Amino acid sequence: MTDDLTPPSPLRLPLSVVLGLAAPPLGLVAWILLSGSRRDLYLQSPWVRAGATIFLAGAIPLFAVIVAAFIGLWPDPNPNPVGLGFLFLAAGLLGCLMALIGVIRCETAGS
């Protein structure tokens, strides 16, 4: 089982910091995806899974309205879904916080 350990990418820290400053969800995604053999540990964490689920649940309604307006299924061709934007913001913040807690818990459990 220890034979298939792959080390984290050397770009994990700088890329995660740069993306984390620009868009925090992308920083967390970069940290998880570039973590080598620990990626499975992160993805099995219930905190990371719950954070990703909440993030997606908040994003899907907003993107559904955007796509429906783009293809002509929405009654207003230029919608202004402020409420769905706030839902996306709140879900994004909560999802990132939960995923960050999951990453920290995985890191401290391995020490």
Image: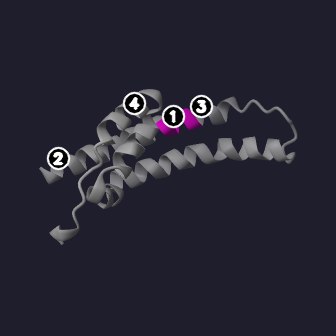
Q: Quadrant of residue 66?
A: top right
Indicate which label's residue lies in the foreground, 2 or 1: 2
Q: Residue 34, position in %: x, y?
A: 35, 49
Q: Which residue is mark 2?
A: 108
Q: Residues within 10 Å of mark 2 (few under 14, many from 20)?
A: few
Q: Position of residue 84 (x, y in %)?
A: 65, 36
Labels 4 and 1: the sequence-earlier one? 4
Q: Nearer the viewer, residue 8 or 109?
A: 8
In the image, which is nearer the foreground, mark 3 or mark 4? Answer: 4
Under tag 3, what secondary structure? helix
Q: Which quadrant is home to the N terminus? A: bottom left
| Pointers 1 and 3 in contact (C-beta within 8 Å) | yes
The kind of residue on which mark 4 rests is Val
Which residue is the site of mark 3?
86
Q: Is residue 33 left or right of residue 81?
A: left
On the image, the x and y values in percent for residue 74 come to: 84, 43
The mark nearer the N terminus, 3 or 4, is 4
- Name the residue beneath numbered marker 1: 90
Task: Please tell me whether mark 4 or mark 1 is closer to you in this view.
Answer: 4
Q: CA distance from mark 2 to mark 3?
A: 33 Å
Name the magenta segment's main secondary structure: helix
Callout 1 amino acid: Ala
> Viewed as shown, does residue 56 lie left or right of 83?
left
Given this view, does label 4 or label 2 mark the residue nearer the observer?
A: 4
In the image, is residue 4 part of the stretch drawn in magenta? no
Q: Are marks 3 and 4 in contact (CB under 8 Å)?
A: no
Eyeballing the image, is 6 above or below 59? below
Q: Residue at x 84, y 47 (%)?
A: 71
Range covered by the magenta-colored residues: 88-92
